[in-house]
Image (cartoon, helix red, strand yellow):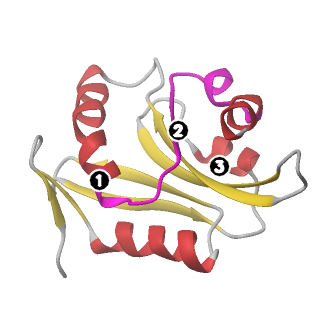
Amino acid sequence: MAMAFKMATTGMWVTDECKNSFMDMKWKKVHRYIVFKIDEGSRLVTVDKVGGPGESYDDLAASLPKDDCRYAVFDFDFVTVDNCRKSKIFFIAWSPTASRIRAKILYATSKAGLRRVLDGISYEVQATDPTEMGMDVIKDRAK
């Protein structure tokens, strides 16, 4: 395995694949979103799913499990009131109510370390059900 970035608070490691996929999304626009998961056995944060440039926010929401936690980043493109095209990257901490308590604690304590590795995030959304991370929430924050 290549170099990984350690998250000091939980002893978790973020794989190079996470950082490289994020940089590809940020600079090359080859991904619309990335979903990350923690492998408790290996203590690694890994890429779970990558959405292509043609996929939508609904595809991201549908890819999140209903009974387990995940992190996600979404590249939101929009046009301002001044008719300027902009792009903002959202970090989503998904922790549904049906997930295990252990998973919720693990994801909550590891979040800051992953965010440090993923440089360039504009906004953060924490959600326990789909209504807390709807497109209306994303549009509202991006203004």
Please tell me which of labels 2 and 3 falls first in the chain: 3
Q: Which residue position holds label 1?
A: 116
Place of residue 140 in the rendered image (x, y in percent of width and height, measured from the top left): 73, 31
Q: Are marks 2 and 3 in contact (CB under 8 Å)?
A: no
Please tell me which of labels 2 and 1 falls first in the chain: 2
Q: Residue at x 71, y 50 (%)?
A: 59
Q: Which mark is residue 65?
A: 2
| Residue 8 vertical placement versus 5 (above, below) | above
Say what amino acid the circle numbered 1 marks: Arg
Place of residue 15 in the rendered image (x, y in percent of width and height, measured from the top left): 26, 67
Q: Residue at x 68, y 22 (%)?
A: 131
Say what amino acid the circle numbered 2 marks: Pro
Residue 6 picture quarter: bottom left
Taking depth in this image into account, of 106 and 22 the one nearest to the observer is 22
Q: Between label 2 and label 3, give the one nearer the viewer.
A: 3
Say what amino acid the circle numbered 3 marks: Leu
> What segment is highlighted magenta in the picture?
116-135
Determine whether the residue tagged by mark 1 lies in a helix, strand or loop: helix
Q: Between label 1 and label 3, give the one nearer the viewer.
A: 1
Position of 32 compared to 36: left or right?
right
Residue 115 is a magenta residue: no
Please tell me which of labels 1 and 3 falls first in the chain: 3
Q: CA distance from mark 1 to mark 3?
A: 22 Å
Q: Are marks 2 and 1 in contact (CB under 8 Å)?
A: no
Taking depth in this image into account, of 68 and 94 the one nearest to the observer is 94
Taking depth in this image into account, of 109 and 143 the one nearest to the observer is 143
| Residue 54 vertical placement versus 57 (above, below) | below
Determine whether the residue tagged by mark 2 lies in a helix, strand or loop: loop
Q: Mark 3 Cα within 10 Å, few/some/many (few <14, many 20+)?
A: some
In what quadrant of the picture does the C terminus appear? top right
Q: Which residue position holds label 3?
A: 60
